[in-house]
Image (cartoon, rainbow, N blue to C red):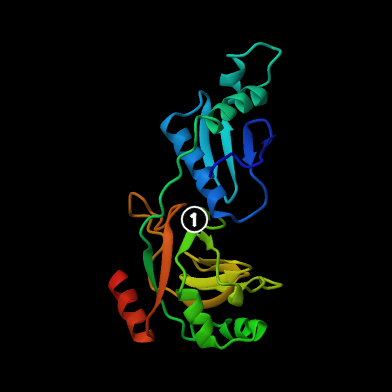
Amino acid sequence: MDQLPPYKILPLGDTAIIVDFGNCIDKSINKLVHAVFYRLQDKPIPGMIEAVPAYCSITIYYDVLLIRNKLSKQTTAFEWMSDKIKEYLFVERNEVEADPLPINIPVCYEKEYGPDLDFVALKNTISVEEIIQRHMAIAYRVYMLGFLPGFAYMGLIDEKIVSPRKQYPAPVEAGSVGIAGKQTGIYPFKSPGGWQIIGRTPLNLFDKEKTNPVLFKSGDNVKFYSITKDEFEDIKNRNA
């Protein structure tokens, strides 16, 4: 990114601040968000508690009492944090990460596991087979994690399979692969959900026994490949 895109710095209550680059799904902006995030991880702002990256924004939580003790009465904690964040934004040039090798995720696209395939096909006037091929053809960037622990928001999907969220949430099985708007994602747990479900992976996306329990992290690349029902059951049994 040759120059910093337009942004706003906004308060979030009394103990957090947001750097907002707009409401969009943009790979270059998301990479910039991560560049700032990793810089904050390497060299935290004094008083910073946590930084949380999202699609096109980053939120920084801070200890307001610690910061207030450093300041004159004429300066607020928000103003002080805002000035410090600008220093991080304007250091020479933000180096963005290279695209990592994709994480390959097996998916069974049988209608037993993809109950909304027919809806997506009807909505976009294409065959179920074409939905599957187009879904597998792209390596997706993990823009952010949220909603459920380990739920990765990925994009952007092929325009021919873009589909709206459901009007009302429905029960969704763990491992279900869904589409919502221009995004795709995997439900790590059984949960109510509003995404159009087109398949399911037998992999466990969240394992509390591991040091890092979440399979994905923001900035990862993910690619899906098709497996049969027998392969699904075999992988699931081996991971049980």
Label 1: how many Cα within 10 Å (few below 14, some 14–19, many 20+): some
Residue 43 rendering spot, x and y as whole percentages: 44, 29
Who is closer to the viewer here, 63 or 118?
118
Who is closer to the viewer here, 86 or 16?
86
Above or below, 99 relative to 136: above
Q: Quadrant of the C terminus?
A: bottom left
- On screen, residue 40 versus residue 182, left or right, reads left
Q: Quadrant of residue 155?
A: bottom right
- On screen, residue 188 versus residue 72, left or right, reads left
Above or below, 222 relative to 172: above
User: Which residue corresponds to mark 1?
Assistant: 149
Above or below, 201 relative to 20: below
Residue 98 rendering spot, x and y as whole percentages: 40, 50
Q: Residue furthest front?
A: 2
Amino acid carrying label 1: it is Pro
Task: Kindly identify the residue that appears in the image at 45 percent across and 75 percent down.
Answer: 136
Task: Kindly identify the residue that appears in the image at 66 percent across and 26 percent down.
Answer: 78
Task: Kindly identify the residue that appears in the image at 46 percent across and 82 percent down.
Answer: 109
Residue 24 rendering spot, x and y as whole percentages: 64, 54
